[in-house]
Every structure is written in structure tokens, then in C-alpha cells.
Amino acid sequence: MLKVSKLNAGYGSVNILWDIDLELNDGEIVAVLGSNGAGKTTMVRAITGMIRPTSGSVIFNGEELAGKSSRTILNSGIVQVPEGRQLFTEMTVLENLEMGAFSKETKEHFRENLKKCYKWFPKLEEREKQAAGTLSGGEQQMVAVARALIGMPKLLILDEPSLGLAPNIVDDILLVAKTLVKETNISVLLVEQDITKALATADRGYVVENGHIALSGSASELAANEHVKKAYLGI
């Protein structure tokens, strides 16, 4: 589904990513792991067209997307839940979810997809007329995830979903991600600092250090890796 090859990217004259190689298959959850500042969010921005790679390839379902606009990439089926949620805080929950219906197809299926989102996140239906800015952090993250799902993604990118949230809320959101993969065959790219939770959710993972892929493997292999245990799990 997604194949990233020799991807280099950065900001201005400063390169952040160096020869990134990453693959993700249909119906798979792949974690991108690493500490703050490792280059994870820059990688997401390069994949989604928010920054232009300096070189390399991003192929999604056979189409080269490197250098394409964010709108083109969104239309291809890659939808991101951004770090920090980035909701329209003065708008209601329902109005924020309506913003996820960006195309003719997603507008036509809005009510159907809204019903699914309310099934996954029942609290949102209770609060649909409430301003998003008055919700708790966990509820706001639910709105951000639901808004992305309204866009009918083929690939859902979750960028730091645990940021600032209680562990039980993170567990709920990651459980929804696993359920989505099973029920809809959506693929998920999970970008996360909390390596324990990420590896408990993902099928495979990549560890990013200083803009490079330092390690990759199955979730169980990475959890058992001595470097991962010492550097990230404190074991």
C-alpha cells in the first residue's frame, strides 16, 4: 500500500530525514517510534505533502506522491490525525466532524459515517452540539480521530495520539484503531513516543533516531530488542 524509499526532507537548508525506507501493507498497523525530536513528525509531513521532500519516493497504491500537494495526497486516501488535534474550538463537535467531509463522496456518505463514529465514540453523540473547545483533552482527541474517519481514509495516520492524555483514554483510542483495521481494512500508521503502548497495538514498527531508521521489525521483535529496552522502555 505505502512504500517510502530513500526519503530525505527538512526545513530550508537543514535536513532532518536521511534516506528513510518504510513500508505498510493493507490492513496493517505500523508504528513509527522514537523520542521527541527524532524526526517522526517531519516524516509524516513529508508523506502528507505538508513539506516537500528534497529527494526520495512516496508511493501509495502505485501512485508517486512525493512532491504532490496535500490536497492531492488527501484525495488519494491518506488522512492524518495531527499532533495536538487542531480542532476548530469555537465550533460544535458536529461542525468539526462535518469538516472531515471534504469531497463529493465523503459528503454523500456523511450521515452513514457519522453513525459509525458515534458507535466508536458514544460520548461524541452526547456532545455533538457542544463547542469542541469545552471538551476534555481525551474527548477532543476522539473528535480529531472521528473527523479523520469521516474522510473515509484508506490510510489513517495517527500522529502522537497519546500526547497529554490519560493512559485509559489512549487505550480507548488505540483499541478503536485496532477495531478499524479488523472491520474496515483501513491501514494505520501510528506515530508515537509511548513505545510500550505502540508496540502493544502495532503489527510492525520502525524506530527513528536522529532522522534515520535505526531499527525495524515485528512488534514482538522490537519489544525484545536490547537497545529498545534500554533506550526507551527503561529495562
Image: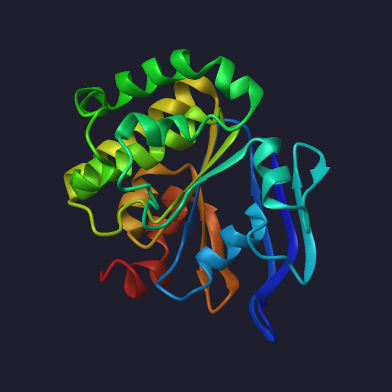
Q: Nearer the viewer, residue 77 or 99?
A: 99
Residue 18 visible: no
Residue 45 image position (x, y, % from top left):
59, 60
Q: Position of residue 23 (x, y in %)?
A: 66, 49
Q: In x, y percent, where is residue 215?
A: 54, 65
Quadrant in which the C terminus appears? bottom left
**138 in relation to 36, above or below:** above
Quadrant in the picture for residue 195: bottom left
Camera-side residue: 58 or 146?
146
Residue 78 occupies which quadrant of the picture? top right
Q: Residue at x 34, y 45 (%)?
A: 200
Res 110 visible: yes
| Left or right placement of residue 166 versus residue 104 in this view | left
Task: Point out residue 97 in the picture as x, y percentages from the top left corner.
Answer: 41, 32
Q: What residue is at 63 percent from the left and 20 percent from the top?
A: 105
- Seen in the picture, residue 156 relative to 126 is either above or below; the reply is below
Q: Residue at x 37, y 47 (%)?
A: 88
Q: Nearer the viewer, residue 23 or 105?
A: 105
Residue at 31% of width from left, 18% of height from top?
119
In which quadrant will I find the N terminus?
Answer: top right
